[in-house]
Structure formats: C-alpha cells, structure tokens
Amino acid sequence: MKYRDIIENALNGHSADYCEIRIEETDNSRLTYRGKSLDTIAQTSGLGGNVRAVTKGGWGFASFNSLDELTTKVADAVAQSKAVGGLKTELGEVEPHVDLVPAYVVEDPTEISLDEKKRQMDHYNDLVWSVDGINSADIIYGDTSRKTFFGSSDGSYIEQQQIHVISRISAQARSGGDVQQAGFSLGSQGDYGLIRGLDDKVTDAAKRAVALLDAKSLEGGERTVVLDPVLAGVFVHEAFGHLSEGDNVYENEKLKEIMYMGRKFGGKHLNFTDGAAIPALRGSFKYDDEGTPATRTALVREGELVGRLHSRETAAKLSEQPTGNARAIGYNFPPIVRMTNTIIEPGEATLADLLAGVNDGVYVRNWYGGMTQHEMFTFSSGEAYMIRNGEIQEAVRPVMLTGNLFETLENLDGVGDDLDMNQGGGCGKGGQSPLPVSNGSPHIRIQKCLISGA
Amino acid sequence: MNAATDKFDEAEVYRIEMESHPVSFESGKLKEIIRRDTSGVALRVIDNRRIGFTSTTDAARESELVDRAATLAPFGSEASFSFPEPSKYPSVDIVDPAVPQVSQNSMINTGEGLIAKLMDEWPDLLCDARIGWSTGRGQIMNSAGIDETYEQTSYYCSLGAQLIRGTDMLNVWAGYGSSRLFGEAELDRLLQTVRRSLRWSKETAIATSSTGDLPVVFTPRGVGATLLHPLLSGFSGKNVANGSSPLGDRWGEKIVDERISIYDNPLINGASGSRPFDDEGIASRKLGLIENGIAGSPLLDLQTAGQLGMTSTGAAGRSLASTPSPNSSVIDIAAGDTHFEDMISGIKEGLLVEELLGAGQGNELGGDFRANVSLGYKIENGEIVGRVKDTMISGNVYKVLSQVEQVGDSSDWVFGSMRSPALQCLGVDVSVKDE
C-alpha cells in the first residue's frame, strides 16, 4: 500500500473534526485529428494530492503537486477549516474500509501500442474522407489511467485504479457558408475493444453529415417527440438527475418543499435509478472519493420521488443515508455530489407502440450536448427525423429540446422495453468536467416538448 | 532543455507555477476556504519535421519527458513552423503587488458585505459568492533562444442569487476579474447587475404574442453568451486552416454591418487575458477581427499560420497538458451611439437577452446559435415588463450582425475578459411554448 504510511503520518495529530488526504497518479494518451490530418498526439502524466478538513461545519481544502511537507499542508487545510467553521460538523456514518481495488479491464487500452492506436484512428479518418462531399473530420481518441490513494481520519485507506477510454468521431460537410456535422461518441471503462470495428458507424456518420446539407430545418414550437435510448439517457441525466443531487437541496428550504419524498412527478411508468454499484459501466466504482461504498439509489418509483444522491455531508444534513455519490474529477477539486450511472427503467412498450398515432412528430436520436439550471434543461439531438402516421420518415436537421422538469415528466407518456446504455458522455458541474458517467434508457415519448427552430 | 536540444532538431519547454486562494459562500454562509498550488512542465519537440508533445505535474518524472517525446515524435503531426527567435515585447500591466497581500479576512468581509447588502433588500434570496486571488508564473524556453518568464496576478469576485416562487426558479449572478485589486466601485457594479436582474424578473411575461421578426436586444453579457462563440469559431486559425470556417476566403470583405468592429486586444492594462506575449513567445498585438464590418484577420498560432502560409498573430493559448492552439485573449467590441434606455424605449415588442442555457450545442462552426433563454426579458411598448421562460432563440451570427439596428453607446466589461456594447438586432428566431 504505496502511500499508506505517508498519509497516516501526515494525518496524525490533526485537530479538525475530520480530515482526509487523496493522492492521485494519472497517465493519459490522446490523439486528435482535424481537417485531413493528425492534429496532436500527446502523452501526459500527473501526480498531485489534496488535504480536506472540516471543523465545526467549515471546510478547508489544499491541493498541490508536490507531496513534500504533507504535515504542513494538513495544518494549512485544518487552519482554513477553522477560519470557516462556526456551526456543527455533520457527516453521514460510513464504516471505515481498508481496501485495494484493481482496475476493471477487458482489454487494457494502456497496454495497446501507440502505433496500433494511431493506425486504427488513421483508418477511421480515411473512412470519413472516403465519403464524397466531406469537408473536415474531427476525431478524438483518449485513454486515461487514474490511481487514487485515499486515507481519512476515520481510519479508511483505499487504493483504486480506473482505466477509461473515449472516442468521438465527427464528420463535417460544407456548402458555401453552411457547415453541417454528424458524429458519435463512445466510451468504456477498461475495454479498448470498443474502439475496433466501427467502420459502418463511421461511414454512416460521414454520409449523414453530407445529407444534412439538403435536409430541411424544422420550425420551432411544441411537438410530440420520441427519443432513442441514447438521447433519453441524456434527458434523464439533465432533466431529473441534477435536481436529485443532495447539494442542491440540503441548504435550500424552498427546494426542499418542492423535492419532498413522495412527490408525484408523473405516471407509474416512471422509474429512475442512479448508482455506481453496477459492474463495468463508465460511472461504476467500488468507493466514491470520500471512501463511501457505491450503492444503487432509486430516485423515482412509479412516478414518485423516493430518493436522492448524497455525499456524507448532504446525507447527514437531510437525515438520509450516504449513497456513495461524492466524486472529484481530480486531486485539485474537492468531491461534490455527482451522478454515476443514471437509468430510466424499461417499461413494456415497443418502439412501434410509441410511434403509433404520432403525426407530425419528431424522432430524435443520439446526443450533441445538454445543460441544466435547476428545473430548466436543454439538450440537443445528433439526428432528427419526421414522424408521420406513426412511421419514421425523412431526416431533418438536428434539434434542441428544452423544458421544465415538472411539466415534462408529466408529459412523458411512453416508456419502451429496450433499455440501452449511453457510455459516450461526460458530465460537468462546478467547474469539474468531464466526469465519467453513463446513462441509459429505453425509447421514450414526450408530448408537447418545445424544440428550437434551426 | 539541454537534454532536449541535444536529442531533437528543435525543442520548447513550457513551465507553469500557480497559486490560488478562493473563499466561497454557499446559501448565504461562508462554506469553504481553498488553497491550490499547481506546477508542471511541458516539452514540445520538432524532429524530422514532426511534433512530439508531452507534459507532467510530477517533478520526479521530468526526466522521462525527453524519452517520451522521442517515442511520440515519429507519429506526430507535421510541423509547419520553427520555434521563434527572441523579439521585443510590448509592456502591459498584468501584475498588481497588492493582490497577493489580500488577506483571508478581507475576502471573507467582502463576501459577507455583498451578501448582506443584497439580503437587506431581498430577504428571501439564497446567495452564493466567491472571492479569490491568484498569482501565476509562466516560462517559455526554446532552442531558437527564447527564455522568457512572465508573472501575472488575478483578483476576482462573483455573486449569485436564487429566488424560488412555487416551482418557478430564478438564478441571477454577476462576476468580475482583473489583474488589479479592485474595490467598492466594482463591487457596487456587481450588486447593481444582480439587483437589476432581480427587478426586471419581478413579473413573468410571455416572450411573444405576435409572430414575425422580433427585435432582440443583447446586453453586453448577452452578446458574450449568444454571439461570441459562434463568431470566434469562424476566426479560429484551426477552422480556417482546415477549411471549416464559413469565412473561408472572405478576408477583406464586408461580412456584417459596418457599425461592428471587434478586436482581440491582449494589451489592455488590467484585463483578464492580457499578456505581453502568447504561449509560444510571440509578441502580443491588437488584432482587428472585424473592422467596420470587414473581416480582418483570423487568430493564428505558429502551426496554423504555417499551414496557411501566414505569420502567427500571437494568439497561441495552452494549458499544461495540451499543445498550443489559437485562442482569443481579450475581446473588445466598439461602442456605437445609442443609450441603452433609448434602445429599449424605441421597441414596441421585443426580447432582451442576458444569459442562455445550453449555448454551444448547435452548429457553431457555421455561425449558428440556439439555446434556451435562461435569463431574458420581454420588452413591450418601450418597457421591460418581466422575465420570459420556456423560450428558445436561434439564428446565425453573421446574419444577425448584418441586421443590426442599434449599437449601445457604452462598452461594458463582461467578467473582466470581454468588453461589449448592447446590440439591437433582427433575424433571431424566437420559439415559445404554446399557451
């Protein structure tokens, strides 16, 4: 246990209510393509750490790259926490753990040679360019290994390693001043194999980009929309997930009145969960960055609010249990309440059932982005198609969807039976982005959803 | 550096050291005091005309960088440049020795004071604030003889407020940063911005009652939130070099209304983003992106300039773990001649846009923008009558800036890194929920 002695020695005799040290070692590889050729190839490595202390409810945090004089850094963070504190420290109870968690790997991307990675991405770049009408390609490949060494004054010492691989492949077509793009993102914890065998997807994206130049834009306004599992996953993340994060609620009396347990959000077909205790997804881990074991939390059961996501502090302040959702993107940030793997549980409808009876609606697939500000959210599709007479028809230009949590969940009237996970995304909050998360859903249908004009 | 110059045709070492000290308030109370120390080194080499890049924040592994760069360079992208030789740099004021002297207590007092002043008037608010300072030191050395160091200070303050009525939530905030320590005057401006947003949001209004081309007024912040990114993507040397900028070969042509002039100016004393030279050691200069409606120059670093057969405009920006790329520094948009009040009073029905949610998800490469108006107001018969909700705007920045109706007469700082007047434009598509 590499840093156990160093951490335990530095924490020895601290005078805060609680204190922890997290040290991190990272190694990253990255390839990017822009235009016709390779833009950058880089390997970076990092070492850093932080001390976090709480005294009488006040937090002190010190981050650094040099591990020298850790005891002084502990003293600094403790002094900062004392300058803040004036109330009471409340932290949810978590059993201390001593554990060593190796990386989950299927085919370790850090073991693949740079040469092979480059040949693979060169090939996809060539494929994009082999489609007539392509003007530029934008391709990213990245893998990262993050080892964390966590020790706390409660007696926990946990070493964990995570290896992630991500890729985004995007093709652009241009006609005069009109630039259109189409692409896809994917990600995996521990499996380079995911990067192989994408030829059909790549060619398809390039062809879609070219076709978009001739596609029509929709008029803005309200329509019935059917979302594919990928975009529906982004929807549950943006529209519901963020508002179920305990740190939004715990010191906000008004929000507590709105987000009370048992509140009805919609019909019995609405069942949402979040949790890292599912093997092998992007948001999966054994312990969060406060040393709390991962769980799975039901957020909505049969349309009613039944749970939310917590750090130790937000759990204690709301008299609920820690859920293992305190996560930090890196050593220079304190952990905050984050999602992990957020899921809309499947229902019984087939896609045909959801489409039946829809006229002048839109079928939206694939994601481009999403943002939330409390009850307001927006997210963008990567593809959009008209639905007429219950059938998916011609492609139109991708759309942005926006709404208000409370109305939209009431208008979510159909949940499919075909759960699928979206592993290609990352989440941003409080300046910490992109954090590995996944989300998933079956196809869903929303009535009266506001979409933008293009 | 010596090990690298021996081994490669050309080499560049970039080193940073930073220290930052924010204090943050949550829900009206002091919550956390942070100290961040960051240091690291990056090595970029050119060998057989190919680029290798690597970096580390682990001082014990610095010696690995040369070997790592040697492994990477044979696979690297083709270099279209050589590292520059030393040159004369302009002077710009980016250090204030008073900044690192700011005490923890003084920052706490500032935050408490701001929150108390807001709560006096609006007791139902939940306020957040962040006050902090930082110092940074950057060093660039290369095999052509550059060995330059610069120091920078920064002081910043942001203030946010949340108001909840039923399930209707309002978030407003304001922020400012400078390399200089600032005091009451700037803090008052922050308070005024937040108060003004709260006042304008007292009522909720329906964004549009008629169809057709509504005039839209962008506040200076609204210009930053809506128009700036899709516009700058057209000026990015990377997009120009690979042919995805819609400006293509339109340099020197009129692309927007002649009242529009936009500069990238890293030589403004005190501004966040000012610098004597860029992150490749090229001297800073004021660059006309658009002058009197005419497309001036793209933003170029060494690599994109080389690809285009031009010279760098001194626009290279980088973080420790990434290779340089062309970026704007301080954006300065020229003022016009219309008072903000006159702009509003001249509009029968229109929209005032301050902040967006989800900007950047549209097709920015083509100059398109679209987003939910997270903070915006309805203008009716010359008056601001309330906040709009469930409203989306979309359009194309080149089209909108060609349909400018009025340009505000004062150019205001937005977060200390951009200066803009308010702009009244046509050509924005407004979508709203059915009633």
Image (tube, coloured by chain):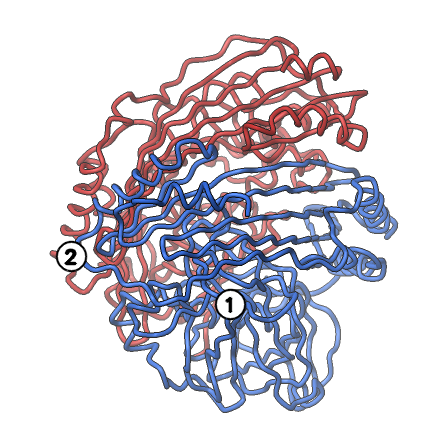
Chain colours: A blue, B red
Tell me the distance, in whole angstroms, between the alpha carbons under discs 1 and 2: 39 Å
Q: Report whether B418 appears left or right of B342.
A: right
**From where the camera sits, is residue B157 visible?**
yes
Residue at the far left: name it: B120
Residue A63 lies, with reference to residue A292, above or below; the image says above
Q: Is residue A51 left or right of residue B243?
A: left
Say which quadrant the C terminus of chain B sits in: bottom left
* Residue with the mark numbered 1: A294
Q: Secondary structure at mark 1?
A: loop
* Residue drawn at the location 80% of the way across and 42% of the way down: A113
Residue assigned mark 2: B119
Q: Secondary structure at mark 2?
A: helix
Q: The residue under label 1 is which amino acid type?
A: Ala
Indicate the position of residue A1 as horizontal and vertical percent values.
55, 48
Chain at tag 1? A
- Of the numbered discs in the image, which one, if any, rests on residue B252? none
Residue B411 visible at all: no
Instruction: Answer with left or right where residue B169 lies relative to residue A230.
Output: left
- Residue A65 x, y percent position in the rendering: 48, 34
Amino acid under label 2? Met
B58 vs A63, left or right, is right
